[in-house]
Every structure is written in structure tokens, then in C-alpha cells.
Image (tube, rainbow, N blue to C red):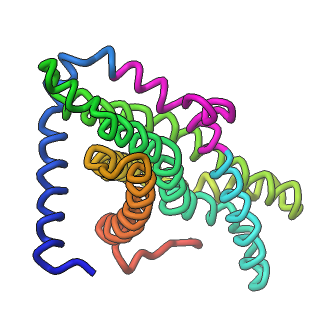
Amino acid sequence: MASPLAWLDRSGDHLVFYVKALLWIPRTLRRYAREVQRLLAEVAFGSGGLGVIGGTIGVMIAMTLFTGTVVGLQGHAALNQIGTSAFTGFISAYFNTREIAPLVAGLALSATVGAGFTAQLGAMRINEEVDALEAMGVRSMPYLVTTRIIAGVVAIIPLYAIGLLSSYVASRTVTVLFNGQSAGTYDHYFNLFLSPDDVLLSILKVLIFSVMVILAHCYYGFRAEGGPAGVGVAVGRSVRNAIVLISVTDFFLSLAIWGATTTVKVAG
């Protein structure tokens, strides 16, 4: 177990790394726009084995479809026990938008793009490619890290929009087709409780998640050591830390945005 001083030292190293990476954003947009464009395609559609299944888009759609299906099934079953199954559309509009879809998007980003970034940067560090860039006069921080942050943040907005729509479609399909609820009833309560403000705040949550996830993954890749095995260790640590960061941040963001005493007006 690490001593408190060692923990503080690592925390300070994390903070300095994150601040430096973010401060490079303006100059990176001017100097490395072409690299950002290349990474945008990689983030959205993947490369290698990830590209075979549709890249991050495919993973996002698959995860949100299944979680949306679960929301529809469980929401209808729970409400049906108290005779209010007509409000299943409310469950989808409320919980998919505020919690389920943002969390799934953050986890999908970590499992696909984030882990890939850690492996790429870790391999470059182990093979001394990062040092070679510095020797050639190329700043490794903006070229390798900040470009990935920009690409991830830009790509996550359309990716999340697709994922959110997929969760809505899945919840509606399972409620109407499998549970036999009227499409008009479902659509009425879904549209009644789907707030544009909630959608925008949901996108804000995902943007914050994406920055945190990419920063964490890039940090562990950039600091990888110990040969090829060290790259695997770095990927494992980055994924674990990203999952914890997403969960904790989601709690505090939800508390700050919607509070702990949120009420819903369902009549009148």
C-alpha cells in the first residue's frame, strides 16, 4: 500500500499533466489540425479489430440498445404492479436522458477509445517514440495527448446523440411491441416529460466524462514503463480509474444539476 506522501506525489503529477494538456488546446488547434482530423476518424470508426464491429459507433449503439431495453422492461414491470404502466414513457424520458445513457456513453468511451489511447501511447513510450518526437523538436504533450482530447470531445457529441436515440427506440419498442402498450399512450407521456434542458444537460455530462476519461487514459499511457507488460498494466489501471471517475463524477453532477429532492408533477 502506498504511503500518503507517495499518493500525494502521484496526485500532483496527475494534476500537472491534466492542466498542461488542457492549456495546449489553443495552440494544438492551430498546429496539429490534420492530426486531430485523423484521430476524429479513429475515435468514431475505430481501427483494426474495433473497426470490424463498427468502431465506437457500433459499441455505443449496442450498449444503449440493450440498456434502453432493460429500462423499458423493468420500468413497465414496476409501474404495472401499482397500476400506472401508462407512465413507462416517462421512465424512458427521465432516466435514459439523465442517468443511463450518459453513464453508458462514458463507459463505452473508456472501453474502446480510452483503452486504445492508453495502449498506443504506452507502446510509443516503451519503444522510445515519445523521446524521439522530443528529439526532433515536436512537443509530445500537444501532439500526442491534446490532439486526442480535442478529437474525443468533438466526436462524442454525435456519438452520444446516436446512443441516446438508440436507448429511446429500444425502450419504446419493448414497451409497445412486447408489453402491448398503446403507442399513443407511450409517446404522450414520453413527449410530456422529455425536457430539452435535460437533453442539453445530459450532453454536458457526457462532455465532462469524455474529457476526464481521455485525460486519465492518456496519462497512464504517457507514463507507462516496464516493457510490453507495463503497457498492459497501464491499460488496466486506466480503465479502473476511468470507471471510478465516471461513477463519482456522475453522482456529484446529478446532485449539482438536479438536486437531491427532485419532484415530478404527474397530474394536473
Q: Which residues are magenta?
A: 36-61
Residue lying at the far bottom in this picture: please name it: 82
The residue nearer to you, when weighing 147 against 232, is: 232
Q: Position of residue 195 (x, y in %)?
A: 48, 53
Q: Position of residue 254 (x, y in %)?
A: 37, 67
Query: Residue, x 19% and y 48% (percent of image)?
Result: 18
Q: Which residue sits at x=56%, y=38%?
A: 56
- Give the vertical position of 207 relative to 28 (above or below): below
> Is residue 153 one of those drawn in magenta?
no
Up-down relation of residue 203 to residue 247 (above or below): above
Tell me the residue at 74%/68% (across/down): 86
* In-front residue for pair 74/190: 74
Residue 157 vertical position relative to residue 251 in the rendered view, above or below = above
Q: Residue 82 falls in which quadrant of the image?
A: bottom right
- Left or right side of 21 for 44: right
> Where is residue 39 shown, x and y percent of the image?
40, 26
Q: Position of residue 60 (x, y in %)?
A: 59, 44
Instruction: Locate the C terminus and report the quarter of the image it occupies.
Output: bottom right
Q: Is residue 80 visible?
A: yes
Q: Residue at x 73, y 79 (%)?
A: 78
Left or right position of 4 against 230:
left
Q: Residue 49: say if magenta.
A: yes
Main secondary structure along the magenta-highlighted residues? helix
Q: Image check: 62 left or right of 17?
A: right
